[in-house]
Image: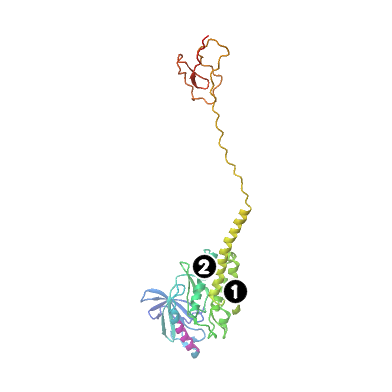
Amino acid sequence: MNLSNALPIKAFIGNCEIRQVLGQGGGGISYLAFDLSLERPVVIKEHFPMGLCTRASNSAQVHPIEAELYAYALSVFCKEARILAGLNHPNIVKIYDIVEGAGTAYLIMEYIEGQKLQDFIPSPATDYETLNLTLCQLLQTFDYLHGNGVIHRDIKPANIIIRNDGSPVIIDFGSAHIGTANRTLTPVGSPGYAAPEQFSPHGRVGAWSDLYALAQCFLHHITTKLKKSCPTHFSKALQKAASAEITNRFQTAKEWLCTLQKRKNKMRLIIPAVLLIIIIMGVAHWKPTTIQKAEPPAPTTPTPRVEPPSPAEPGPQTTSARPQKSASPSIPPFATPLPPLIPKDSGMILTDEGRITTAPKKTQQ
């Protein structure tokens, strides 16, 4: 990265003090600065199109090489900066001010704290659902951006920041263009990400160019492990957006987004339908099993009441003495047999079954 044209650290642009040089692209140089009036960090983009201007190492003044082309580029930069300042979207960096001087112009923008896309995608915490959500949010942002006639022209992983809350933000609009460009003043974009038409003098740059770069951002940084978890339709959509031929790509962000959402909605319908078919087939093949009702327990046959035996022949009878038990009863009335409580002359006897009954009357001879 050639930073020989960058302004020195601690140089001032308006009320902002330069603290760090962030990088240089085809359209200009980016700085991290601090706004001393509002006490907040900001990012400054200096209009410095490569090949159209130069500056001495000990001076801030910018000198055009191609005066006519440089003047035209500077006027477009200032016009586009004012238009971008009117954009209002949570996933687009805010532009606070534009400062003109030293033969050029400077955009003062919101500083976004977070993770660059090239670090976010291969992160172990990023799964397919997170990846898909991020892409859909970016496509919604591009739909808004392109709907307002703005083409970014320098989409690359370093220009997409993922905030700590997971939302993506598109930054660095120093190379942005209003409307479709039928000619390119200078090669704009980052090699490896920018669409081929951006490096052609008569390239037709449009929404499809930003979508091409967005697809390349994802294709370059999706890990092999993460790629295996991505559905086929997701990968095919990335390949389509990254096609070398403009006519083979998605022409709008909404077209790409609809492709992903239709597939998702289709799967939402297919899964319940498959489950319903499985249930129906299961019911069709189900044979009711006869449930054996538990038979109620057979009533316990009460122990028949045993009457004292009648004498075979008439004769004198005496009160029967308690018979000797030959065996313990099946269900003893008490755990420990009690001693007889029946008086001898009461006319009552205790049977072997533990019942108290009246003794049979004596028969007169």
Q: Is residue 239 visible?
A: yes
Q: Position of residue 327 (x, y in %)?
A: 56, 21
Prevailing secondary structure of the magenta residues? helix
Decide if residue 128 is on the left or right side of residue 88.
right
Say what amino acid the circle numbered 1 marks: Lys
Residue labelled with disc 2: 133
Q: Is residue 55 visible?
A: no
| Residue for point 57% across, 64% down | 269
- Residue range highlighted in magenta: 69-81
Q: Quadrant of residue 303?
A: top right
| Residue for point 60% across, 73% down | 239
Decide if residue 194 is on the left or right side of residue 55.
right
Q: Where is residue 69 in the image (x, y as percent from the top left)?
A: 50, 89
Say what amino acid the circle numbered 2 marks: Leu
Dot placed on the residue nearer the N-terminal end, 1 or 2: 2
Query: Which disc number belongs to residue 240?
Result: 1
